[in-house]
Amino acid sequence: MKVSILGSGAWGTTLAQVASDAGHEVLIWGRNKSVVDEINSLHRNHQFLGEVDLPKSIRATIEVDEAFAGAEALILALPAQSLRENLVSWKSQYPTAIPSISTLKGIEVSTHLRMSEVLAQVIEMEQEKIGFITGPNLARELVQRQPAGAVGASTNPEVAELIVTIFKTKYFRVYTSDDIVGCELAAALKNVVALAVGIVVGMGLGENTQAMIITRGLNEVTRLGVALGAAPLTFAGLAGMGDLVATCQSSLSRNRSFGETIGQSGDSYSVRQTLGKTVEGVASAGAVVEMAHMVGVEIPIIEAVSEVVSGKISPMKAMATLSEIDTGAEIDLSGPG
């Protein structure tokens, strides 16, 4: 197949390698001409992936028309909060007849929409043409062809199977799901929990605290997801628990690392100014809290993270507040609280 990947960052380039290894003709689109030129000439993306040698068959372009032309599937690998802006600029030429597969793990802050919903709204695509791939997939490990698994989700079984076909290699296994709502919510919400874990690590707290945050965070993610129409079991699989554990425990995770720096300094503003990186959990946290309030679900850990990253409270104050919350049944999916 001819597969075009929209995005030349670490994740887009890594997926390009996986699709190439699966035997497909792969073209990467990116805005950064120096990155595009390096992929074409040196077969590397040093800015995002260091000294990794990419398959020589992968090509790159700065012309989006070229990426659209002849493609049989599009893979979206852009920052979540810039998706709408890009889609609006591409709307008149965007090929709606072919499947579009999102890799974006975020909630649009201004609308609370999932990324597949943004795509359907702006491009006016049928949901049956849209898919989503997610899972515990850290780019730095996957690009080294270390074994990993993912979930290809779509309301259309044919699109879910297409995701398997595009990315099936000896080291990368893709399972299918029809719960795109649950998969997208799990992918976005786990970033906020990873920030929480990073914060407690930065504060010098140990494995007990981290385990509590991960498991109680998963409980919050699951309850909110179910309230928004997701299937509970989605959160127990690769898209839920798998991605959450990898993101919370790895130093390769931007969200975990960002949270750790906040926990060490106690000052989210200076960390954001210094690092200047796209951290989806920071962008999504406030929107997630607003979504939970709309459906009456209590998410104290995620709400504490939102207040810390927005500078309203310190990490120490957040931990003190969480310690004062009354406990109840450990697992209860029956109600909104």
Image: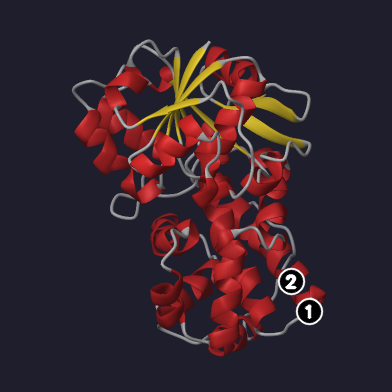
| Residue matched to label 2 | 210
Work out whether 236 lies above or below 319: above
Work out whether 178 lies above or below 111: above
Residue 68 location (% of width, % of height): 34, 19
Of 248 and 227, which appears nearest the observer?
248
| Residue type marked 1 | Gly
Work out whether 135 lies above or below 317: above
Q: Confirm or deny contact between disc 2 and disc 1 (CB under 8 A).
A: yes
Q: Quadrant of residue 226?
A: top right
Q: Residue at 47% x, 42% y: name it.
A: 104
Q: Is residue 142 left or right of residue 14?
A: right
Residue 192 in view, yes or no:
yes
Within 10 Å of disc 2 (Cα), the crowding (few <14, some 14-19, many 20+) is many
Of 58 and 151, which appears nearest the observer?
58
Q: Residue at 66% x, 22% y: name it.
A: 21
Kindly identify which numbered label has been placed on residue 206. 1
Q: What element does badge 2 sit on? A: helix
Q: What element does badge 1 sit on? A: loop
Return the residue found at the far front: 41
State the colouring used for the structure image: secondary structure
Residue 133 location (% of width, % of height): 57, 33
Kindly identify which numbered label has been placed on residue 246. none
| Residue type marked 2 | Gln
Quarter of the figure that contains the C terminus: bottom right
